[in-house]
Image (spheres, rainbow, N blue to C red):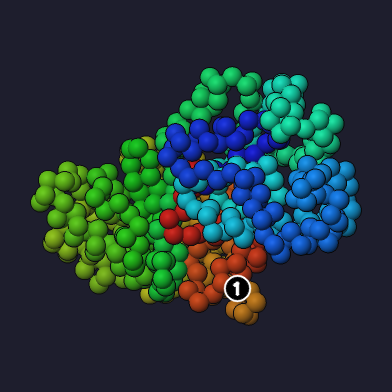
C-alpha cells in the first residue's frame, strides 16, 4: 500500500506523514527534500542559469533558492518558469520511480498533478485549521517574509476534495495529529484488502504469475483463482479460514490449486491447520473436476459451483454467473460481497457475455476484468476474451468505482492496456503482483 499525503505548505503534512510512516512501519519519502538535489546537479544548474541568469545567486556566488522562488511564484505562466517546472518535474519523477514501493508514505504538495496520482494508493489531504498560525510558522521556519508566503500560496494547487480518502484539519496540537494517525492506522488494519497475486496468461515472466486475487481481512481469506506460480506471493503458513474459488478449469487459472491442497495436508499433519480449505469448483470438464476431487493428500472440502446460488460464510457472500468463454469449459464470473462492498471478478469471458456481466457488476466497488487483447490488433468483436476497450465499456455501463485490468499477454507492454481502457473509463488500474487495494 502506498499512501500519498498532500496539502499546502505549512499545513502539517510532513509531520503527519513522518508519524504515520513510523506508526505503520512504512518508508517515509519527503519529496521536497529529494527535490533539493536538483540544485546539485551540474546539468540542471546550468539550465537554471540559462533561464534566469546569475542574479539568483547570493553574495558568495551560490544559488539562492529564495531569489529563484520569488521569480517562480511571481511569473508562473512565463515560458522560462514553465521550462523550469518541466525540467525539475522530470528529474524528480525519475528519482521517485526508483524509490516508491509498497509500504511507503509519500509527502508532496504537488503529487495530485503528477502521473502517480492515478495509481493505486490511499490519498490524504491535510488542511490548516488556522491560517494565521500556518503563515507565521512558515515565516519562522523558512526565514521568509509574509509577502513571500502569500505569493507562494497563490500558486498552490486547488485540490479536488472528492479525490481523497481522508481529509484532516490540523489545529497544530500534537494530540490531533495522533488521533488522525490512529484513524488511518485502524482503517488500514481493519479494512478488507484485495491483493494481486498473479496477472499474466497463458504463462508468466520474471516476477509475475498467472491469474490469482486474494480478498482478505482479519476474519477470512478468499482466493479467486490460483494460477501458476501465484502461491509464492501468498503467506502459505496461514491457510486457516482459506476459501478458493476457481473461475474455470484452464490450467493457468488452477494449477497452483494442487500446491494449496497438498500443503494443507502437510500443515494438518504438523498441527498447524485446523480448518480444511473450502474449494468452489466448476464441474466441467469432468475429467479435470474428477482429478481434483479425487486428490487424496489434501485437507479440503470441494463444493460444486451452482449458478445464482448465494454462498454465505464468515462475513462475506459469494455468487457465480455463468459466462461464455470456451466450449471446452464451464466459466464463471464471481461476485464477492463483504461489509456492504462488492468485488466482481470476470474470469475469462467473451464480449458475448457483456450484458450479463454489466447486470451482475452493477454499481460494484471494484471490477477485476480480463483484458487479454488490444483493439489495435484487429480481433473480432466477440471471441474468447475481452479487449481492454471492451473491459472499459463494461465498467462504464455497470457504473463501477474502479476497474482493475488483468490477464495480460506476457510480451505486451501493460501501458498499452491502460491507454486503451482510459479512452472511455477514468478510474483504470493495471493489476500488478503484490499490489493491494483497500476495499
Residue 434 at x, y = what percent? 43, 55
Quarter of the rendering containing residue 173: top right
Residue 59 at x, y = what percent? 80, 45
Residue 401 at x, y = what percent? 60, 47
Left or right of 378? Residue 21 is left
Task: Please name the residue that numbered disc 1 is placed on.
Answer: 374
Residue 131 at x, y = what percent? 74, 24
- Residue pictured at 14% horizontal, 55% vertical: 266
Please indicate, yes or no, whether residue 60 appears anywhere in the rendered image. yes
Which sits in the foreground, 188 or 52?
Answer: 52
Left or right of 320? Residue 413 is right
- Residue pictured at 48% horizontal, 45% vertical: 27
Quarter of the rendering containing residue 54: bottom right
Quarter of the rendering containing residue 256: bottom left
Please indicate, yes or no, whether residue 426 appears anywhere in the rendered image. no
- Residue pictured at 48% horizontal, 60% vertical: 432
Question: Relative to 283, does residue 326 appear above or below in the rendering?
Answer: below
Amino acid at each position: 500500500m502506498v499512501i500519498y499525503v498532500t496539502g499546502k505548505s505549512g499545513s502539517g503534512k510532513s509531520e503527519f506523514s513522518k508519524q504515520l510512516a513510523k506508526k505503520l512501519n512504512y518508508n517515509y519519502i519527503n519529496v521536497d527534500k529529494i527535490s533539493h538535489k536538483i540544485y546539485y546537479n551540474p546539468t540542471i544548474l546550468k539550465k537554471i542559469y540559462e533561464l534566469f541568469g546569475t542574479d539568483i545567486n547570493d553574495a558568495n556566488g551560490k544559488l539562492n533558492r529564495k531569489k529563484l522562488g520569488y521569480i517562480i511564484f511571481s511569473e508562473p505562466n512565463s515560458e522560462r518558469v514553465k521550462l523550469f517546472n518541466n525540467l525539475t518535474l522530470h528529474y524528480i519523477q525519475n528519482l521517485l520511480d526508483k524509490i516508491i514501493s509498497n509500504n511507503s508514505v509519500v509527502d508532496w504538495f504537488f503529487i495530485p498533478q503528477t502521473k502517480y496520482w492515478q495509481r493505486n494508493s490511499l490519498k490524504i489531504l491535510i488542511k490548516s485549521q488556522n491560517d494565521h498560525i500556518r503563515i507565521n510558522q512558515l515565516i519562522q521556519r523558512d526565514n521568509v517574509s509574509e509577502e513571500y508566503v502569500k505569493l507562494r500560496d497563490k500558486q498552490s494547487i486547488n485540490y479536488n476534495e472528492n479525490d481523497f480518502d481522508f481529509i484532516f484539519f490540523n489545529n497544530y496540537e500534537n494530540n490531533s495529529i495522533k488521533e488522525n494517525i490512529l484513524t488511518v492506522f485502524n482503517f488500514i488494519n481493519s479494512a478488507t484488502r484485495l491483493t494481486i497475486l498473479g496477472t499474466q496468461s497463458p504463462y508468466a515472466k520474471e516476477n509475475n504469475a498467472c491469474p490469482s486475487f486474494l480478498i482478505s481481512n482479519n476474519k477470512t481469506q478468499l482466493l479467486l483463482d490460483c494460477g501458476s506460480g501465484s502461491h509464492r506471493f501468498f503467506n502459505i503458513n496461514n491457510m486457516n479460514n482459506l476459501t478458493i474459488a476457481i473461475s474455470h478449469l484452464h490450467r493457468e487459472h488452477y494449477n497452483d490449486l494442487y500446491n494449496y491442497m497438498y500443503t494443507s495436508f502437510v500443515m494438518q499433519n504438523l498441527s498447524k491447520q485446523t480448518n480444511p480449505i473450502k474449494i468452489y469448483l466448476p464441474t466441467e470438464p469432468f475429467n479435470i473436476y474428477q482429478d481434483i476431487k479425487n486428490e487424496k493428500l489434501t485437507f479440503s472440502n470441494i463444493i460444486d459451483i451452482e449458478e445464482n446460488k448465494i454462498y454465505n460464510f464468515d462475513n462475506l457472500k459469494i455468487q457465480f454467473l455463468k459466462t461464455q468463454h470456451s466450449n471446452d469449459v464451464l466459466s464463471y464470473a464471481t461476485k464477492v460481497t463483504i461489509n456492504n462492498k462488492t468485488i466482481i471478478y470476470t474470469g475469462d469471458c467473451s464480449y458475448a457475455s457483456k450484458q450479463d456481466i454489466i447486470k451482475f457488476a452493477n454499481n460494484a466497488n471494484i471490477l477485476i476484468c480480463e483484458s487479454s487483447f488490444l483493439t489495435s490488433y484487429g480481433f473480432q468483436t466477440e471471441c474468447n476474451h475481452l479487449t481492454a476497450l471492451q473491459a472499459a465499456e463494461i465498467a462504464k455501463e455497470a457504473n463501477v468505482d474502479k476497474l482493475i485490468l488483468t490477464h495480460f499477454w506476457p510480451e505486451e507492454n501493460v501501458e498499452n492496456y491502460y491507454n486503451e481502457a482510459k479512452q472511455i473509463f477514468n478510474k483504470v488500474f493495471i493489476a500488478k503482483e503484490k499490489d493491494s487495494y483497500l476495499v
